[in-house]
Amino acid sequence: MDLRESRQLQKREHQIASDNSIGFCGWILVLFSLLLSLLTFPLSIWMCIKIVKEYERAIIFRLGRILPGGAKGPGLFLILPCTDSFIKVDMRTITFDIPPQEVLTKDSVTVCVDGVVYYRVQNATLAVANITNADAATRLLAQTTLRNVLGTKNLAEILSDREEIAHNMQSTLDSATDDWGIKVERVEIKDVKLPQQLQRAMAAEAEASREARAKVIAAEGEMNASRALKEASIVISESPCALQLRYLQTLNTIAAEKNSTIIFPLPIDMLQNFMRQ
């Protein structure tokens, strides 16, 4: 939280505290409660002393109005019986899952998307005074924000730009819950479920693309092989002994496989003589 946001929160707390004057009759009731506590001391001490844990803050109401000074705690604090009450607020980070939402994307594709949100109470006074249930409100706002953000994206952007979408959601939620004293720390997109027909269509498209690339690679391999054979034939034609060495190498390869194949070398020149006769 930067300095500007801190000043805004302090200004809101000051406005709440400045409007919480209990009046003349209120002070009379407070003095009466204080006198009653002194008369019943030490029994009343058990009703006056309260404890909040390290991760909690207490908002004290005196005659229905929030006491100046904001949230109390952690540790011990005192309240007056009959006139004071308090509400505990958990300041730890809270996580919740966004239920799967069916969203119509910008390119008219229906997808089912869910996510997870991490938030915490940044200002306990605002979380109590400005909204009835900050947790429920944040959950509902996260659902509508997910729909609104994904509705402006097409399917390709949803599948490839999850981090950007999550960042946009986090910024939108954080600014919307600022008046409630809520700080949205992180938003993550968990899963994007596509219709079965769309999955089959995308799989067929990907398979066709892979087959096309495989054919191109095979054609390039055959072209390279033909060029290599052409160069080899030129080399062999320049040296007659090279053909004989190649022939002996082929025989060696066949013999190493331990098969029953028998090869009889027959010169081509002999066949040409028989054909002439």
Image (cartoon, rainbow, N blue to C red):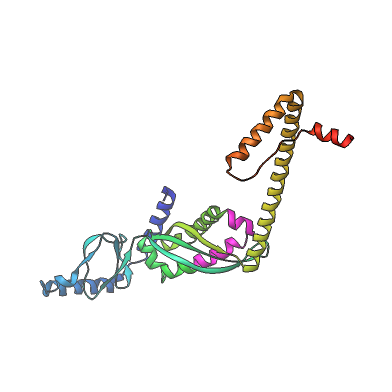
Question: Of helix, strand and loop, which mostly describes the magenta segment?
Answer: helix
The image quarter containing residue 127 is: bottom left
The percent position of residue 3, horizontal first and vertical second, equals: 41, 48
**Residue drawn at 49 percent across, 57 percent down:** 170
The percent position of residue 265, horizontal first and vertical second, equals: 72, 35
Q: Residue furthest front?
A: 277
Which of the two residues, 2 or 173, is positioned nearer the viewer here? 173
Which of the two residues, 215 or 233, is positioned nearer the viewer here? 233
The percent position of residue 241, horizontal first and vertical second, equals: 71, 25
Q: Is residue 146 magenta?
A: yes
Q: Quadrant of the C terminus?
A: top right
Q: Residue furthest top?
A: 239
The percent position of residue 8, horizontal first and vertical second, equals: 43, 54
Magenta region: 141-160
Apparent side of residue 144 relative to residue 5 in the rendered image (left or right): right
Apparent side of residue 172 relative to residue 65 in the rendered image (left or right): right
The image quarter containing residue 125 is: bottom left
Q: Residue furthest right?
A: 277
Asked whether residue 16 is in view, the answer is no
Which of the two residues, 8 or 110, is positioned nearer the viewer here? 110
Number of marks in the rendered image: 0
Asked whether residue 64 is in view, the answer is yes
Q: Is residue 223 magenta?
A: no
